[in-house]
Image (spheres, rainbow, N blue to C red):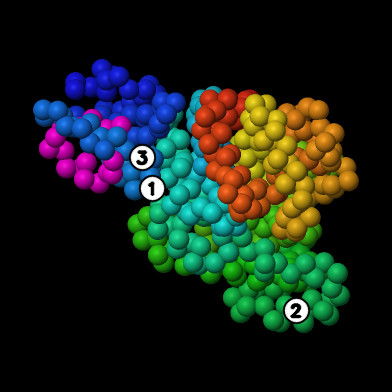
């Protein structure tokens, strides 16, 4: 055995790495995938991997499964496979509910020629529960996709929509670098309709660290890039009552993260997008003012923008009004310390991407998740109509219960019945069917009604592995549409 290239193995060329006399490659044959290592017989690093070994002279060949243990070991030996912080560069979060989308994501990011920094490992705790995955599994799946494509230019790992300190602990422990705090449960939407006397009463019940009227903004007249801000008692109290407990929760989570991170670098994102009413410009100023007062440092913030941001479909609302509102939020972000604005539920919002690029001047993070799952279904629809029909029929049966935790407006009555669908690939473009398929992913992947038959999750994974190139190609094409406006804008 001289080197991996000389062996009769189906190793993906992009993955071949030689480091200090040890060679690594991604085995990608019709019958088997895995990690291949060719190392000197006395290389002590082999002990950290698991797999089959073949010895010949002074060289050992090791065939390793794509396991969590091997992903952890590989990250230790190849530092570019370890997540890092991304800073203020334009960035994109590329969620992957199935653990097989990263190769397609890498190809799309590579086409941006370094203009967009990627987060390849991203999943919320809610999604992990519904897909039966752990933080370690999410990171490991991304590791194998990154390694197979030979990506060495860095990436982040987003522990998305965290609500508890235990969530933070679980994700920090395995190497996540980007922590999205979701204080939505602590937002008080009652503030929108409360009288001044009610606001005063509610403000008196806020955590002591939250300042309501006496916060340094009272009677101020701020000018931010042509915008004028005046803060009277009602404006301040409404902002404090609506967001005060949420701000305090973010501060608590941030302090906990700082206390346990030690020397491990991390970035913080604050997500206030899952609220009933949009975040006004005055509220944005108040939130930032209070967070800074409490010592919180963050790299990106996701307000609740005007219009509707539903899962897997384009923006619902007036794009011109959205851009005017966005311009104010972007100006505030620049004024208060140059953090990025983040767009959650950012999948497929093609009509507003140019505005996002223009108004943020590149200080933007776009977050996607379910659209990669939909591209998996598109791949199935193009190649196995019977299989996609099974999935769609099942999804229709579970939509009414599954939609409760999402902001969606799809109606079963408007979505085609399975029996009437003639073009299954085209079904992925129908608004209602697309949302139905999107939000039922948890039920589909957790279905246990197979009665001896293989369950959906296993069948989907096997199908995508068999048709990996078709899936990666669909993802690359789809995400090129997402990312191009942020490269050319």
Magenta region, residue range: 36-51
Q: Is residue 415 above or below residue 28?
A: below
Q: Position of residue 168 (x, y in %)?
A: 48, 62
Residue in view at x 72 percent, y 46 percent: 394
Chain-order first, disc 1 or disc 2: 1
CB-based contact (under 8 Å), mark 3 and mark 2: no
Q: Position of residue 417 (x, y in %)?
A: 84, 40
Circle 2 SS class: helix
> Residue 124 appears in which quarter of the rendering?
bottom right
Q: Is residue 484 left or right of residue 140?
A: right
Residue placed furthest toward the front = 452
Q: Which one is in front in this view, the residue at disc 3 or the one at disc 2?
A: 3
Q: Indicate whether residue 165 is drawn in magenta.
A: no
Q: Is residue 9 above or below residue 410?
A: above
Near mark 1 (Cα within 10 A), the count class, few <14, some 14-19 or many ≥20, is some
Circle 3 SS class: loop
Q: Disc 3 marks which residue?
A: 65
Q: Is residue 257 left or right of residue 422?
A: left
Q: Disc 2 marks which residue?
A: 202
Q: Is residue 403 above or below residue 94?
A: below
Screen quadrant of the C terminus = top right
Residue in view at x 50 percent, y 44 percent: 121
* Disc 3 to disc 2, C-alpha distance: 57 Å
Q: Disc 1 marks which residue?
A: 68
* Disc 1 to disc 3, C-alpha distance: 9 Å
Chain-order first, disc 3 or disc 2: 3
């Amino acid at each position: 055995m001289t080197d991996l290239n000389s062996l009769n193995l189906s190793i993906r060329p992009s993955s071949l790495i030689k480091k200090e006399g040890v060679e690594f490659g991604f085995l990608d044959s019709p019958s088997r995938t895995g990690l291949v290592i060719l190392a000197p017989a006395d290389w002590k690093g082999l002990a950290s991997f698991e797999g089959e070994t073949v010895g010949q002279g002074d060289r050992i060949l090791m065939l390793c499964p794509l396991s969590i243990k091997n992903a952890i070991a590989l990250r230790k030996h190849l530092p570019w496979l370890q997540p890092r912080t991304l800073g203020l560069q334009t960035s994109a979060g590329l969620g992957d509910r199935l653990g097989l989308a990263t190769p397609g994501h890498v190809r799309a990011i590579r086409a941006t020629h370094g203009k967009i920094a990627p987060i390849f490992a991203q999943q919320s705790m809610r999604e992990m529960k519904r897909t039966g995955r752990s933080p370690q599994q999410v990171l490991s799946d991304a590791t194998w996709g990154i390694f197979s494509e030979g990506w060495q230019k860095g990436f982040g790992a987003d522990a998305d929509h965290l609500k508890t300190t235990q969530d933070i602990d679980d994700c920090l422990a395995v190497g996540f670098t980007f922590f999205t705090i979701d204080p939505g449960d602590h937002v008080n939407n009652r503030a929108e309709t409360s009288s001044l006397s009610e606001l005063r009463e509610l403000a008196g019940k806020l955590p002591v660290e939250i300042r309501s009227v006496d916060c340094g903004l009272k009677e101020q007249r701020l000018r931010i890039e042509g915008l004028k801000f005046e803060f009277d008692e009602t404006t301040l109290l409404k902002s404090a009552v609506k967001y005060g407990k949420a701000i305090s929760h973010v501060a608590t989570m941030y302090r906990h993260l700082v206390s346990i991170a030690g020397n491990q670098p991390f970035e913080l994102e604050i997500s206030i997008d899952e609220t009933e009413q949009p975040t006004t410009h005055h509220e944005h100023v108040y939130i930032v003012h209070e967070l800074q007062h409490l010592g919180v440092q963050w790299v990106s913030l996701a307000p609740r923008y005007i219009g509707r941001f539903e899962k897997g479909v384009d923006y619902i609302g007036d794009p011109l009004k959205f851009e005017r509102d966005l311009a104010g939020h972007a100006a505030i972000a620049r004024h208060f310390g140059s953090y990025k604005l983040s767009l959650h539920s950012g999948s497929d919002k093609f009509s507003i991407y140019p505005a996002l690029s223009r108004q943020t001047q590149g200080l933007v993070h776009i977050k996607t998740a379910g659209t990669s799952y939909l591209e998996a279904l598109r791949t199935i629809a193009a190649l196995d109509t019977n299989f996609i029909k099974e999935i769609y029929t099942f999804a229709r049966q579970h939509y009414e219960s599954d939609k409760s935790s999402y902001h969606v407006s799809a109606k079963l009555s408007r979505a085609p019945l399975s029996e009437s669908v003639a073009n299954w690939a085209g079904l992925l473009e129908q608004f209602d069917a697309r949302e139905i398929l999107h939000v039922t992913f948890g039920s589909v992947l957790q279905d246990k009604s197979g009665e001896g038959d293989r369950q959906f999750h296993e069948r989907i994974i096997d199908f995508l592995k068999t048709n990996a190139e078709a899936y990666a190609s669909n993802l690359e094409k789809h995400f090129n549409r997402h990312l191009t406006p942020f490269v050319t804008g």
